[in-house]
Amino acid sequence: MPAPKIVALDMDGTLLDSTGSIPDAFWDLLPRAREAGMAITPASGRQLATLRAMFSRDEPDTFIAENGAVVWHRGEIVSVRPLPVDSVRRVVDALEQAVLCKPEVSYTRAGMPPEFQAEVDKYYLANQQVSSLADALAGDPDDTVKIAVYAAGDAERDVLPDLQRLVPELNPVVSSKHWIDIMPPEVNKGVALRTLAEKLGVRREDTAAIGDYLNDYAMLEAAGWAVAMGNAHEDLKRIADDVVETNDENGALRRIGRWLEQ
């Protein structure tokens, strides 16, 4: 395909290497993409504050945060899709190791196990601890955009079935081995990519998405060109137009570089 105008780029397992770092080559690639009229858009389950901090060296114009529930463009949040309040209350009443996510801040219960807190610190920079997650709903219960649930074991095997029974009206998505993100059924990275493309006046065929895990599935389906990493979940490879090298081989950056050379 010709060089896309928007490239939605997943983070963990895609842009980031196995140490969780942004490769040095990215910082050379980003200004080249800007000059070519290509918007590289990090798309992640991370919160907006965390993404902006990770890219403080050279901030992209656009972020897709919270697995598509929050879209930020040039200094402002342009799309927010909240969860139903009743569903949120049911989850926070049933679970402790969870993160209650609002557009610009998240909440966790104080006194959680160290392994859970370490994972929260990695993904949620703007996080506040409260005595109860219900306390975080007291101010404005209508602006919760995501609930992230942590599993010490295998999230897809051990926790997903229980969540599907607890909130069948919602959309629990496995975002990594240990995390499941709960969102409204109409919210995912694919919807966010389409929303962004409409705002910027970009046709679907001029968009691309690069990802590695199940929370990237809808994003790859929505894009004009779908790219799966060499280390991707097999379900993503089956729907991809292109399978590139692994994240430790800078497969995503190499693919973007080839587009820029066209």
Image (cartoon, grey):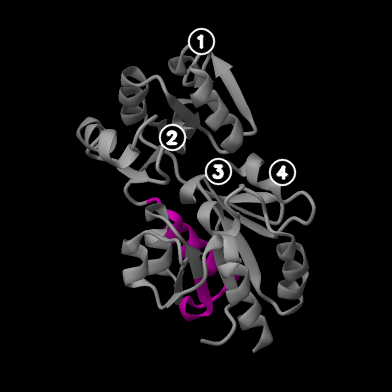
Give the labeled residue for mark 1.
Answer: 131
Tell me the CA gap for discs 2 and 4.
20 Å
Q: Are marks 3 and 2 in contact (CB under 8 Å)?
A: no
Question: Label 3's element?
Answer: loop
Question: Label 2's element?
Answer: strand
Tell me the CA gap for discs 3 and 4.
11 Å
Q: Earlier in the sequence, mark 3 or mark 1?
A: 3
What's the residue at 45%, 61% (across, down)? Answer: 231
Question: Label 4's element?
Answer: helix
Segment colored magenta = 187-208
Locate residue 16 relative to residue 74 in the image: left or right: left
Of the numbered discs in the image, which one, if any, rests on residue 46?
Answer: 3
> In the rendered picture of this protein, how many numbered marks are placed on residues?
4
Neighbour tally class for label 4: few under 14, some 14-19, many 20 plus, Cα within 10 Å = few
In magenta stretch: residue 76: no
Q: Are marks 1 and 4 in contact (CB under 8 Å)?
A: no
Of the numbered discs in the image, which one, if any, rests on residue 148?
Answer: 2
Give the labeled residue for mark 4.
Answer: 53
